[in-house]
Each structure stands twice: as C-alpha cells, then as structure tokens.
Amino acid sequence: MEKKLETPKNWNLETLEDGRLVLNMGPSHPAMHGIVRVLLTVQGERVSDADVEIGYLHRGFEKTCENVTYNQCIPYTDRLNYVSPLINNVGFALAVEKLMGVEAPVRAQYIRVIMSELSRLTDHLTCIGANAMEMAAFTVYFYLINAREELYRLTDAVAGGRVTPAYTRVGGLTQDLPPDFRAMTAEVFKKVRKNLSDADKLLTRNRIFYDRLHNVGTISKEDAIAFSFTGPALRSTGLPLDVRKATPYLVYDRFDFDIPVGSNGDNYDRYLVRMEEMKQSMRIVEQALEQLPAGPVNHADYNVILPPKEEVYGNIEALMAHFKLTFEGVKPPKGEVYQAVEGGNGELGFYIVSDGTGNPWRVRVRPPCFALTGGLSKMIKGGYIADIVSTFGQINMIGGELER
Amino acid sequence: MSNYLLETFKAKFPDDVLETHAFRGDETVLLKKEALLKAAAFLKDELGFDFLMDLAAADYLPREPRFELVCHFYSTRNNYRLRLKCPVAEADARVDSLTGLWAGANWYEREVYDMYGIKFDGHPDLRRILMYEGFEGHPLRKDYPLRKRQPRIPHRD
C-alpha cells in the first residue's frame, strides 16, 4: 500500500481500505496541551501509525532575537519554557557571557543555581500534576499546583515576576536576593515536601496510576540516543546523562547531588525519575543557601552590565556606559559559542553567533522537547489511543520552547 | 594550540577540512558539505560521538557561500563535544541527510528546510514543520523581512 494512503494529510475522518481509521487528535484537544496535532491511523483501539504535527505556537523567537540587543532577548527567553523560565534566563546569559569571555561574580552564580533549581521544581511539579490529572487523579493536580504556586511566589519575591521573571542580565542579575530569602525558602520547601509526599502516597503505589504508566510509552536506550533524547526521558532508560554532572556549569560541581535513573524507559520510570529529581533539586538549593557567599551580584566592568544608578547620576564614565549599554547593548567579539544547561526536560542549548555588533547575528535554541516530541510517534505506535495521553504528558512537551 | 580531535580530523580528511578553530573552547571543524555524511559516520562509529545534539543552520547573507549548516555532537563515552559546520551555497542548497545515522535528525532537518530552504538528500519526509503548507519563503533567511505579511491561504476541506 502506498505511504500516501496511510496518512492522508487532510482533516476528514476516513476509513482506509483495510478497515483502519484515520483519526485526528488535536490540535484542540484537552490532553494535547493546546497545540499539537497527532494524526493517527488506528486499528480498533491500537495506534498503527502516527504523524505528529507541530507549529501552532511558532512566534519567531530566533528571528526576533536577531533584531534586538542581547539583554533584550532575555524577556523573550522567559517564554521559551514557560514553566521553568529561570533556566532559560540563566542559559542565555551564560551563553552570551561565554561568548564575551566574562564570568558573573560567585554570588550571582550561586543565586543562578538556586533559581534554576526552583524552576526545575516548578517544571516537574507541572508535568506530574498535569499528567496525574489526565489520568483522572485530580486531587494530585491541586496538591502539586499548590506547591508550584508557593514556588512561584518565591520567584516573585526574588525577581518580581511569577512566570516571566527575566531575572538574569549578561554579567549578573537584575537584583540580589531579598534579605529573608532563606527563611522564605525553608517555609516553602516544608510545604513542597508535604505536598510531594502526599502526591507520592496517592500515586506511586496506586494500582490504576501504575497500570496506566507502567510499560507504556517504552523506548529503548539505543532509540533514545538516536532520537537525541535528553533529560528525564533519557535517564528513564538508564543512561545517567545530566549536563549538571557531565559538563558542570556555574557552581554545580560544588554540590552533592544524585542523578536518578530508571531502567525500563517507560512512563512510570519517567515519573519516578522526576519525583526523585525534585528532592535532589531541594538538596542543591539547601546546600547553595548554606554556602552562599557575600559580595556583588554584578560584573564589575561597566561595559558588560549597567552601572548602579548612583554612579550613573554621579559620574560621567558611568553615565556614558549606561547610555551606550542601553542604546547599543553589550558587544561580544566576533565568534560563535554553544552553551548547554540542564533544563527541566533535558539539555537546553544556546548557539549564538556574534558579528561584533550589539545585536546577535544568530541565536539558535536547542529545545529539549523538540527531540522528545520528534520521538513521540515512535513511542505511541503499537499502543492504545488512551495511552497517548500518558506518554505525551510524560515527555512534558512545552509549546513555547518546542516551536519558539 | 594543538588539539587531538581537530588534528585527527585534519589527518583523516585532508582534502575536505577547510578550517578548524576552538573559540572559547568549542572545538569546531569547517568542512566541505560533500564530506558531511562520511565525517558524521566517522564521528559516530569510530570516535564514539553517539549524540547528535543539535542540527541548525545560519545565514551569512552577503557572504558566498551564504548558508552554514551547524551540527553539534556529543559523546557520552568521552564526555566531549564537537561542532561540525558546512558551507552551503544558495544555488546548490542541498546536503546529505543524517537521518540514516540518527533518527532524531529527521525533525532538525525539517526545521532547517523550513527556515532556510536547504534541502536534504535522502530525507524520508522533507516538509515544513513549524510553518504551514503554503507559506511563502523561508523566515530565518536574512533577506526575509521581519514584518513581512503572508498571503491568505485558501480554505482546506
């Protein structure tokens, strides 16, 4: 039979000659998180072929970035993975700093680690919460989203924004941590731990949840590598690859934390990996707060980051630097760099090419869930239609970074 | 500065390597596009680079050849990264597909085709991925205006 006949590219329900049915899942489907269309060819309840179609949330992030200054890109990076925006902020700032050959002060690096881990927590909480809700465990959704809300409020207190913090700048941060941050974090973590343990009791040994996830959406280690999987989806197959450990950036090499791995490569393992990673993230934050050094959070050079306002109004050098940075932006030398950070879903990479001016020549984002969604059809083929929901939930597709 | 990986590449493909550099520690090989497939296979099979982390392109408009295909590889065995780049001219915007080596190259190449119009020989299903069928032009090319409007597409049944 011709390939054309198997996946017709139109919107109609259609019965093929051999009795299979062409079924449209999404783009407007509650479990497709809004914006992905999966064209299924089904034999009864079994998926025999699947074509994942994306692009409904494409906003031209990369094109936009080529037309603004480096620091103006940072608010746009919030909108990449909008459940873990701080990791994107940090990744972009790190890439530009690498391009310029500068480093943020140690205190700023610690704060970046703390904020990245808080973002990882919100990312995993959203993923598991939404996944549980789609498996009909609605209570868990509220438990986890309440925990996420606490973390968002913490982010809000630090950066001045719940989901769109735009917290980093090239060479530093917008502001230091609030004075009572340690006490606030301890308070929030107490609630997060309580809600996590409640969710754990409701889900991990729950017969229905286990049956819906175990041996569903299985992918082998070899296939996961071939599809460039990273993050929890790769680690669920047993490969302990984590950018934080493999090629440590910031000050991740100063903390003691573990990389949880699965063994089956199925949805249940991905769930377990995420649950454990959240505990490890909290461990990292607590260690970082313990070690947090005093000092400035911004680079000392006024050619890298805006000088403090008192200086701008007080001396001509700072005023000129302020003017030049505002209008022309930082100017990295000609060159190209690739900087990877561990996002919520896996390796988030920024490839930036500079032509020596204040606007980047090329900004390329390597979104972790692009590769994951590319492997989705492989993971759902042969399974039941209902299982697509759990697999799709566990690869944690985030439209903002998938389609940029 | 001598570098084992870059030297290995120069010795293995003396006629194909155009340039190497390690700006900010990112080891980069610029090679002819005809050699991309065999160089990638060499990386995968003999040097242990098992991950194709990223595949993208860049447009350097007034320059000729205009495009550059940029691949980032990662080796879990040696915990090492390498960047491979190939210049691609607009008149002959065709490159061999890497889908035979990495299944994940499928979507990356579709995106490069969508955004830059570079075609991949041997790709099983080369069509637009982020843009829709009927979109005119390739949006990440430097000569595509930032605020260009697209014509309305006819209603599909």
Image (cartoon, rainbow, N blue to C red):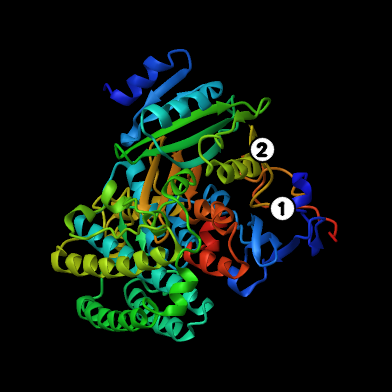
Query: Is disc 1 placed on a helix, strand or loop?
Result: loop
Kindly identify which chain the residue marked by label 1 belongs to.
Answer: B
Disc 2: which residue? B117
> Where A122 falls versus A233 (above or below)?
below
From the image, which quarter does the N terminus of chain B lie in?
Answer: top left
Disc 1: which residue? B132
Residue A127: image location, x then y, percent:
45, 70
Find residue B9 and report its image quarter: top left
Query: Label 2 vs label 1: CA separation?
Result: 14 Å
Residue A19: image location, x then y, percent:
78, 60
Horizontal arrangement in the rendering, residue B24 relative to residue A77 (left or right): left
Kindly identify which chain the residue marked by label 2 belongs to.
Answer: B
Q: Amino acid at mark 1?
A: Tyr
Residue A111: image location, x then y, percent:
26, 63
**Residue at left offset 48%, top offset 82%:** A137
Q: Is residue A320 visible?
A: no
Foreground: A207 or B35? A207
From the image, which quarter does the C terminus of chain B lie in?
Answer: bottom right
Q: Which mark is residue A90?
A: none
Horizontal arrangement in the rendering, residue A78 relative to residue A67 (left or right): left
> Where A29 falls versus B79 (above or below)?
below
